[in-house]
Image (cartoon, helix red, strand yellow):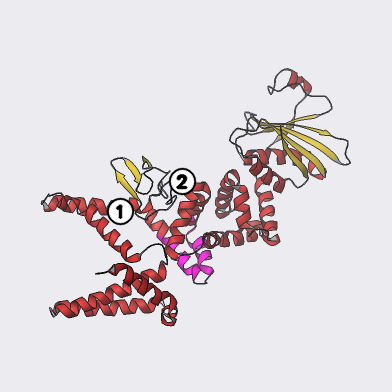
Amino acid sequence: MENITEISYETIRKLILESEWGRAVRQEELFGFLFNEVYEFIDGCNRKDVDNMLEEASDVLMILLYIVIKNVDNQQNNQIEELLYRVNRKLQTRYSVFFEGNEDGEVEEKHWMKTKYMEKEILEYLYCPNPDCSDYAVPGRGNMMIEGKSVICRTCGHAGKYSGHNTLLYSVKYRRRLLNTANENYAGYLKGTLSYADDYFNGHRDDYLKIMRYWISGRTAGFALRNYFVSRHNTSDKTFDEFLLYPLRNFLKNMLGNQEMKLSRSVMEINDLMLKCVNRNYSSMKNRFCKGKSEEWEKTWIGYMGYLVKSMVVPVEYVTDDQLSTGYLNCQDTPLNMYNLYAVLDRGKKVSIFFAQFSTDNKENGGILKADLSECRKNTQVGRALLSVILKFNLQHISKMRCILSNVWKTADFSELSAFLRDILPATANIECE
C-alpha cells in the first residue's frame, strides 16, 4: 500500500479546509455525523456484519480526522501519524507490564492506573524549559517523559527534577479544574462573546488571579501558560492576552471612578496582582494593557499606578547634620545646603529603607533629588519612597527635577525601574543611575 496515511491525510485536509462544504460545515454538524456513524458501527458489530462494521469504522475515522484537521491545522504534521504515534505511546506506557511478560492482572491494572494518572495529572502539564529546544515552553504535546525522579525532554534531551521550572501551575492543587474553567470561558470569548471574559473575572475571581499571577510571573512560565490555551484553539498569543486583560481594564477604569470600591477586598487583590507586575515586567504589561499606544488606556494605567503607589506612602522625616555626623543613619557627610530625608518603613522601629537628598539647581523651577537605594530590592519600594518624599515636601510642583539613583541592587532592570518611575513621578525630567 503506497504511503496510504500520507495520501489519506492530504486528501482529507484538502477537502475539509479548501472545499466549499469543508469551509462551511460547523463543528457541531460534524459531531452529529460522528454520533450517527458510531451508532451504525455498533449496529454492524451487533449484527456481526464484518464488511459493514469495517465500512462504518472507516466513516468514524474519516469524520474524526475532519474534526481534528479543522481544529488543528498544521501542514508540517500528518495528523494521522500523530494519532497513531499517540496510540503507540499509550500502548508502550500504560501496558508496558504486559509487553514485558508480566501476566499478573492485578499488577497490570495498578500500573495502568498509575500511568494514566501520570499522563492526565502530570505529563500533560510538563514543558521543556530549554530556550534552544524546538518544544520550548510547550506543555502537553507528548515531548516530555519521566524517568525515576527526572523529567526529560524527548526532543532535546534536557533533564531536570519535576518542579516549578518545568511544570505548569506546579504549586496549584486543583490544576485541572482551574485550567478547564479558564479554557471554557476562553472558548466562549473566542466566539465573539466578550462577556465570557467578564464572567470569568467576576465569577471565578480566585482562579483568574491565579492564572494572571502565573501569566506575569516569569518568561518561561508565561510562555507555557499562553501556549497551553493557544494551541487548543489555534489562536494567536495576542488573543489570549486580550482575554485576560479585557476585564482587568474595565475593572481598573471603574475603580478609578468609584471611590467606594477602593476599600473592597477585590481592589486589594487586584492591587497585589499589579504590584507583582510592577516588580517583574512593567513595560511589557503596560504595553499590553494599553494596546500599544492607546491614549484612553494609557491614561487609565497611569492614573491607576498613581493611586496604587499613593496608597503605600510611608512617613518621611528630616535628618539633621548632627544626626548624620553621629552615624544615626550610617550615611556619609552631606552638604549643608541640602535637605537630608529618609523614609520610615516601620513607624515603631524607625527602620530606614531609603535615604534621599534634595537641592535646587540653576534651572528655573528645577531641582535634584538624589536617592540611595542600598536598602531597596523592588521597584515598588523605590517608587513609594520617592513619591513619599515628593508629596511630603511638595516637590511635585518642581517641573524640571532630576532624579539620580545610587546603589541600585544588582538584579534590578534599570530600564524597567525608570519606566515605572516616569509614570508615577510626572514632574521628573530625567532619571539617572550612578
Residue 220 image offset from top left, x and y in percent: 48, 47
Does residue 107 appear in the picture of this structure? yes
What residue span does the magenta drawing correspond to?
180-207
Q: Amino acid at mark 1?
A: Glu
Q: Is residue 197 magenta?
A: yes
Residue 353 image offset from top left, x and y in percent: 64, 32
Placement of 391 over or under 287, stated as above or below: above
- Residue occupying the point 23% across, 53% down: 92
Instruction: Say the numbered circle drawn on residue 132.
Output: 2
Quadrant in the picture for the N terminus? bottom left
**Residue 161 left/right relative to 359:** left
- For the residues carrying marks 1 and 2, which lies nearer the camera in this image? 2
Q: Which residue is mark 1?
A: 119
Contact between labelled residues 2 and 1, with CB atoms less than 8 Å apart: no
Instruction: Give the residue at the far left of this rendering.
Output: 103
Q: Amino acid at mark 2?
A: Asp
Quadrant of residue 4 within the rendered picture: bottom left
Closer to the N terminus: mark 1 or mark 2? 1
Disc 2 secondary structure class:
loop
Residue 75 image offset from top left, x and y in percent: 42, 65
Name the foreground residue: 265 vs 382.
382
